Image (cartoon, rainbow, N blue to C red):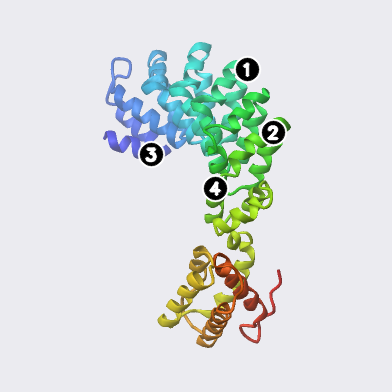
Amino acid sequence: MKQGLTNLSNNQRIEAIKHHYSKFNVQEGYDKTLFSKTFISACIDGNIEVVNHLLSLTSKEFQEEMIYSHGNFAFIAACVCGNKEIVQLLLDLTPDQTKREEMIHAHDNRGFIGACASGNKEIVQLLLDITPDQTKREVMIHAQEDLMFIEAVRYNHIEIVELLLESTPDQNKKEEMIQAWGNQVFLANAQSGNAKIFDLILEHVSDNKRDEILSHAKTDLVLTTAANHGYTKLLNKLLELIPEPKRSETINNYKLEPYMDMEKHFRIAQELANLKLVCKDVQQRLETQLQNRNNIPCELTRFILSFATDAANVDHMNRVSDIMSKVTEQAKFCIFPKSQIKSHNRGSFVRQMIEQKLDSDTQHLGF
């Protein structure tokens, strides 16, 4: 009965609750553990009807016990799951300011952090609005060493990022937030790949702190993370921060050049989509040459090979293979330094693929 009660839908759960408690005198005693679990489950699911019905069956004393049980878990769960109506209800049922603040800041502001990480702007704004004291707001915003700001950046919630920045009027604290945990904000941005978030962050950096803060954005880990995820636009913005000749050295050392304009590669991939690989030997040859001989990113290779489905045109495959063989032969006479040969081969392959029509219906591609 207990497991079924917590797993039913809204209407089913309400009917089950009515049936269950028709067997008992609610005024004299009932299963409080079951009541609390059902209440928390309803808060997680956003079932406001079930929440209200449970509240209607209980005394004021036990209402408070349900609401604040397990360290205010019902409130935290409603915040994390984006159930604003329930968050507002729980706040309304807590007129005592001290208890309300305890609920809002429970478990080191876990509800606020969860709302930021989940991108629930309305709940984040609500919690900020009902915390008018700027000192307490700042404690909430910067809790756990600005973890919510990092999480908002990581999960690509640009509105939350902007809200947290604008809610921090003190420039020093704002820049401390941007530099939280060293390069973690910029690393999180490299993982999500949102160039707009990067620009937004820079808008809130003062001139006298710009070089110091941007040093965290130019680390090798941030650059290679953006590259490995294929975030061309963000990668180029990061590289623009590095002056020459250091920029060229970084590009060469980490073989970033193939990732700097993935859009060009994907145009070619769309052309190669017509190949419809069926010959295993040719497929293996293509994969090897794409990855090893021409220094094309493995992400692009997988993208191309993902089209290996039905009907094929082996003639097209052979033409692609011929271009690869030609590039490999030309490389024997390459005058470039050994460290640059693969990049040169890749560029040569890309150029010849663009110049070569794969079939009579294919138009020349342009950059």
Q: On residue 220, which mark appears? A: 4
| Residue 269 shows in the view | no
Mark nearer the N terminus (2 vs 3): 3
Say which quadrant the N terminus sits in: top left
Q: Is residue 289 above or below residue 99?
A: below
State the CA–CA distance, disc 4 to disc 2: 24 Å
According to the picture, the residue beneath numbered tag 2 turns out to be 204
Q: On residue 134, which mark appears? A: 1
Please state if 280 lies on the left or on the right of 87 as rendered. left
**Pointer 2 local density, CA inside 10 Å: few below 14, some 14–19, many at least 20:** some
Which sits in the foreground, 113 or 322? 322
State the CA–CA distance, disc 4 to disc 1: 37 Å
Which one is closest to the eye, mark 2 or mark 3? Answer: 2
| Residue 194 shows in the view | yes
Q: Is residue 327 above or below residue 29?
A: below
Mark nearer the N terminus (4 vs 2): 2
State the CA–CA distance, disc 2 to disc 3: 51 Å
State the CA–CA distance, disc 4 to disc 3: 55 Å
Q: Position of residue 325 (x, y in %)?
A: 53, 82
Mark nearer the N terminus (1 vs 2): 1
Q: Would you say the residues marked 1 and 2 are in contact, meaning their CB atoms lie under 8 Å apart?
A: no
Q: Is residue 197 above or below residue 124?
A: below
Which one is closest to the eye, mark 1 or mark 2? Answer: 2
**Pointer 3 local density, CA inside 10 Å: few below 14, some 14–19, many at least 20:** some
Residue at point 57%, 79% (across, down) = 327
State the CA–CA distance, disc 1 to disc 2: 19 Å
According to the picture, the residue beneath numbered tag 3 turns out to be 12
Which one is closest to the eye, mark 4 or mark 2? Answer: 4
Q: Position of residue 304 (x, y in %)?
A: 52, 71
> The residue under label 3 is which amino acid type?
Gln
